[in-house]
């Protein structure tokens, strides 16, 4: 299960986060950094650079955006073998101070962004510089986004026919029957086999270790001696892998919505923690709805709101809304509200309208977007491949069944849906790695900035604490009593102040700082929802 975000007051770039692990696996290939393979490829990339030009019409990007490609080896152990191209985008630093038109802002280099996933595309990231919250940063930095290996145009992965990716109305039982479990196990096995059939021996090379290596090649291609990087959600994990492998290549790094990098967590146990955290965030949402019962009429307590939600699930199971939205689609739609509280007003209104006999908003918000099927299938394929390759997973269904049956007794909202999203990893046909031991010692890494919301469900707060502990010299800024997944450039001025001070001046607080929560959303129907990748 995944998601990542780069927030903004205008709505935000929503891109896509994470999940899951134990057992034994194959050792890291190439001795971590990839030995001469990375150094050789980076040297070639530095000599060639990136031939930026107009973005293709198919990409439909504004004229200020430039696009190019960077070549990386599929296998860093064979740098002279098969090459793949990563698509890169850029908007140059404007040099314009938004608060003083007469002042020319000096350029500080390139700021590279990854939105997470795995499977998220950062291609549109440079457009963030158009928003007021990002103009100061966009004045000093070239804003650079890219599509990681496997994503979009960068040697895209696929595990099934995209036309079959979006299924019709589906159930979402909190306590599935044995027959339903057998059905989902069969689907997971078929999906894993489809990944192998469509990708062949290349499948094993889509992993976080290679994503970190690719990042160093991109750094070199951009002409940057040291990297300035910002990762959200899963992007914080392979960013931390990069910091471990290439600490001397780091200038500044921002980890927004940091995931737990402990090798024992990658990825099975992170998934269990995530499912537990979503139960708390689901309760937060229901309590907010209850406080605004005069608007929505769904109940004056969180328990009463849950009763309304369950009533809707029952109706949808009997008769899917518009023939498209069943209990599974409803759950997926409300799961998004667990990531981002600016979804709360629209989701609550859609549920209220549906129970009053008007399903239009629910269908619009929860129904599949068929036009996005190819993109969604690709994102899911990359997500699955990276997480399954990254570390060992339980291969005995009884382990999954035992752990998640226990968890679902206290955290039913997301537990089983999370299982079905990741279960192909139990039957994965490619070799698994041992996760990198993310860790830096005193003086190895320049100071880095970790941002975390205290009630983030997709990246539980314990992960930020662990990241802070492992990256010596890092500083943790916490948004207290808030749960939005990805807080950089959002509505919290305190958070944004720390972000700007770090990126523009290299200035950080001492070890830790806290910000009060941003205001809760107003109980009104949200305007047009931000563009978002499907959440699974």
Image (cartoon, helix red, strand yellow):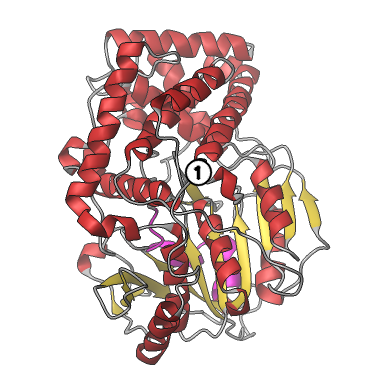
Q: What are the residue bounds of the magenta stretch?
A: 120-138
Q: Is residue 24 magenta?
A: no
Residue closer to the observer: 397 or 339: 397
Residue 500, x across and y down, in percent: 67, 67
Q: Residues within 10 Å of mark 1 (few under 14, many from 20)?
A: many
Q: In terms of depth relative to the viewer, which is nearer, 406 or 140?
A: 406
Vertical position of residue 51 compared to residue 426: above or below:
below
Q: Could you tell me which quadrant the C terminus lies in?
A: top left
Give how far across and how far down residue 520 sits, in percent: 65, 35
Q: Is residue 99 above or below residue 511?
A: below
Query: Would you say residue 121 sits in the magenta stretch?
Result: yes
* Residue 356 seen in the current view: no
Query: Which quarter of the figure has residue 324?
Result: top left
| Residue under the image location 28 percent in, 18 percent down | 321
Q: Position of residue 81 (x, y in %)?
A: 25, 76
Residue pictured at 45% horizontal, 58% vertical: 208
Q: Position of residue 165 (x, y in %)?
A: 23, 37
Q: How many marks?
A: 1
Q: Residue at x 28, y 72 (%)?
A: 85
Q: Nearer the viewer, residue 316 or 215?
A: 215
From the image, tell me which residue sits under label 1.
267
Residue 255 at least partly seen = yes
Q: Disc 1 on helix, strand or loop?
A: loop
Towards the viewer: 131 or 318:
318
Picture layout, residue 473 above or below residue 324: below
Q: Is residue 276 depicted above or below 531 in this figure? A: above
For the stretch drawn in magenta, what is the main secondary structure? Answer: helix
């Amino acid at each position: 299960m995944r998601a990542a975000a780069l927030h903004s007051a205008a709505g935000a770039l929503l891109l896509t986060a994470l999940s899951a692990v134990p057992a034994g696996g194959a050792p890291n290939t190439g001795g971590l950094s990839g030995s001469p393979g990375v150094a050789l490829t980076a040297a070639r990339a530095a000599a060639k650079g990136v031939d930026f030009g107009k973005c293709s019409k198919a990409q439909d990007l504004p004229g200020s955006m430039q696009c190019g490609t960077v070549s990386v080896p599929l296998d860093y152990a064979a740098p002279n073998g098969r090459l793949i191209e990563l698509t890169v985008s850029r908007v140059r630093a404007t040099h314009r101070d938004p608060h003083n038109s007469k002042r020319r802002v000096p350029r500080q280099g390139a700021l590279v962004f990854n939105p997470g996933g795995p499977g998220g595309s950062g291609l549109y990231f440079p457009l963030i510089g158009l928003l007021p919250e990002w103009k100061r940063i966009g004045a000093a930095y070239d804003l650079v986004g890219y599509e990681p290996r496997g994503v979009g145009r960068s040697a895209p992965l696929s595990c099934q026919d995209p036309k079959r990716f979006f299924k019709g109305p589906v159930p979402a039982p909190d306590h599935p029957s044995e027959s339903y479990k057998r059905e989902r196990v069969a689907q997971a096995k078929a999906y894993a086999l489809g990944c192998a059939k469509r990708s062949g021996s290349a499948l094993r090379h889509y992993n976080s270790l290679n994503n970190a290596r690719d990042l160093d090649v991109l750094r070199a291609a951009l002409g940057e001696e040291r990297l300035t990087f910002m990762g959200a959600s899963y992007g914080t994990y392979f960013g931390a892998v990069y910091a471990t492998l290439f600490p001397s290549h780091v200038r500044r790094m921002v980890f927004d919505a940091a995931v737990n990098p402990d090798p024992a967590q990658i990825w099975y146990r992170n998934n269990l923690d995530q499912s537990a955290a979503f139960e708390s965030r689901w309760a937060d949402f229901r309590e907010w709805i209850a406080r605004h019962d005069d608007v929505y009429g769904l109940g004056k307590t969180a328990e009463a709101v849950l009763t309304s939600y369950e009533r809707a699930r029952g109706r949808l199971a009997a008769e899917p809304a518009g023939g498209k939205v069943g209990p599974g689609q409803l759950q997926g739609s409300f799961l998004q509200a667990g990531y981002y509280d600016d979804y709360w007003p629209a989701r609550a209104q859609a549920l209220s309208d549906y129970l009053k006999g008007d399903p239009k908003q629910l269908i619009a918000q929860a129904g599949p977007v068929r036009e996005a099927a190819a993109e969604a299938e690709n994102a899911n394929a990359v997500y699955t491949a990276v997480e399954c390759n990254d570390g060992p997973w339980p291969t005995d269904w009884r382990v999954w069944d035992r752990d998640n049956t226990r968890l679902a007794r206290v955290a039913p909202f997301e537990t089983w849906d999370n299982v079905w999203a990741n279960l192909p990893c139990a039957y994965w046909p490619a070799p698994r790695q041992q996760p990198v031991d993310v860790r830096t010692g005193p003086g190895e890494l320049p100071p880095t900035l970790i941002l975390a919301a205290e009630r983030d469900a997709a990246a539980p707060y314990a992960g930020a604490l662990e990241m802070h502990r492992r990256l010596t010299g890092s500083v943790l800024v916490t948004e207290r009593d808030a749960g939005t997944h990805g807080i950089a450039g959002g509505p919290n001025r305190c958070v944004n102040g720390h972000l700007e001070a770090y990126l523009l001046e290299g200035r950080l607080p001492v070890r830790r700082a806290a910000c009060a929560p941003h205001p809760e959303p107003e109980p009104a129907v949200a305007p047009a929802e931000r563009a978002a990748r499907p959440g699974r």
